[in-house]
Image: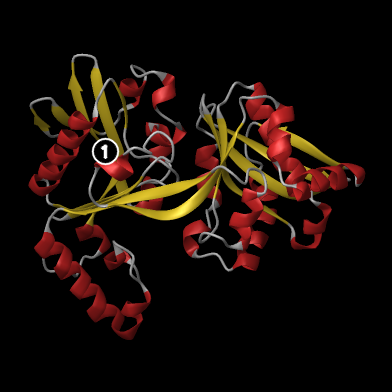
Amino acid sequence: MYQSGNYYTVNNWQSILTRLPVSSFDVFHRFDYHKLFTRIERAECEAFVFESGDTIIILPYLKRSIDEHLPHFGIKGLFDITSVYGFSGVAGSNFDESQLTDFFHAFHNYCREARIVSSFIRLHPTLNSFLASSLPSVTEANRIVIVPVDDGLENITKRFKHGVRKGIRKATAKGVSIRRMDKVPIDLFQSIYSETMERNGATSFYRFSNQFFEELNMVDEIQTTYFAYLGALPVSVEIVLRSQDYWHSFLGGTLSGFRESCANTLLKYKIIEDAGNAGAKAFILGGGVSPGDGIHKYKQSFNPVEDVAFNIQCNVHLDDCYEALIDDYATRQGDKAIQSRRFQRYLQG
């Protein structure tokens, strides 16, 4: 492990989070959530930490061996860093902008020393909203929708577009009912989710295996699965990830023949109601594939005025190695290489 002054790295940081105010981190910062993605990314969990007095700053991530992913590559002993799926970024307490600037400078030095070529960080849309203006290499990747749930269901409903209120009435009139489950019923969930991913032409990134959901079910108190039933038939589903302040629309779908039932609209309404009753601040719906697409507009209908930036941070720590990896990718992919401008595209294909 690494240590330099008040900066250090750890492979399990759950005990650090227990020393932070619960309002200063989210479900995506948890160590056990990161563990879910180690097999998918062929990575190990790590966090870069600063501690001094009552100040704590922590950046959790996944560290990947480029040797393992690209065994043919000529330069050995290299790594890179990526985020888990969701909104993570930094968490912490009692720090100011100057300390945060110093933190990322120290993180860059650590990455260079540890032979980490690049880092890709998905930033939390509320806890890290200030980073867009205070740090370099932060760019807006998408727009996402947040529904505040702490001011009463009547006020929340007033912010809905007319189509949402109409959809709730329609689904209720059709007899749609909502059921909640503490664990993901995997086969039932996959029967709806997989059909939705096929219909939308989703990439393999979104095709989660049964093993992933088995492991998710072993993580305590972070998720509820909501199903919308039309009679005895489940037609829409959504996994919600939860922390004290934030509930997140994680994965879900609706059977193609039942979208007109507005079952998903009633389902989201019930999630919003439950989140408010549980004392959460917001239900974060996420966005679409790109700003303004159909999925994004549907989510906007639940709160047209709360559309915020989803920011990412892309940093190169070893310039020569990064350029060599991009050149290697271009050689391997040929004409296909121009189809991807992803920051860490060297691990594609």
Q: Quadrant of residue 316?
A: bottom left
Residue at the spot 79% in from the left edge and 51% down from the top edge: 262
Percent x, y of residue 13: 30, 28
Up the image or down, 183 lies above or below 229; here it is above
Depth order, front residue of 168/338: 168
The quadrant of the image that shows the N terminus is top left
Q: Report crowding for label 1: few under 14, some 14 to 19, many 20 or more residues within 10 A (C-alpha).
A: many
In this figure, which colouring scheme has been used for the structure?
A: secondary structure
The quadrant of the image that shows the C terminus is bottom left
Q: Would residue 244 be found to the left or right of residue 136 on screen? A: right
Total marks shown come to 1
Percent x, y of residue 188: 70, 48
SS at circle 1 = strand
Up the image or down, 242 lies above or below 42; here it is above
**Residue 232 visible within the image:** no
Residue at the spot 50% in from the left edge and 46% down from the top edge: 212
Residue named by callout 1:
46
**Amino acid at dot 1:** Glu
Q: Would residue 296 be found to the left or right of residue 203 on screen? A: right
**Residue 213 visible within the image:** yes
Q: Quadrant of residue 87?
A: top left
Q: Would residue 344 be found to the left or right of residue 24 on screen? A: left
Q: Quadrant of residue 8?
A: top left
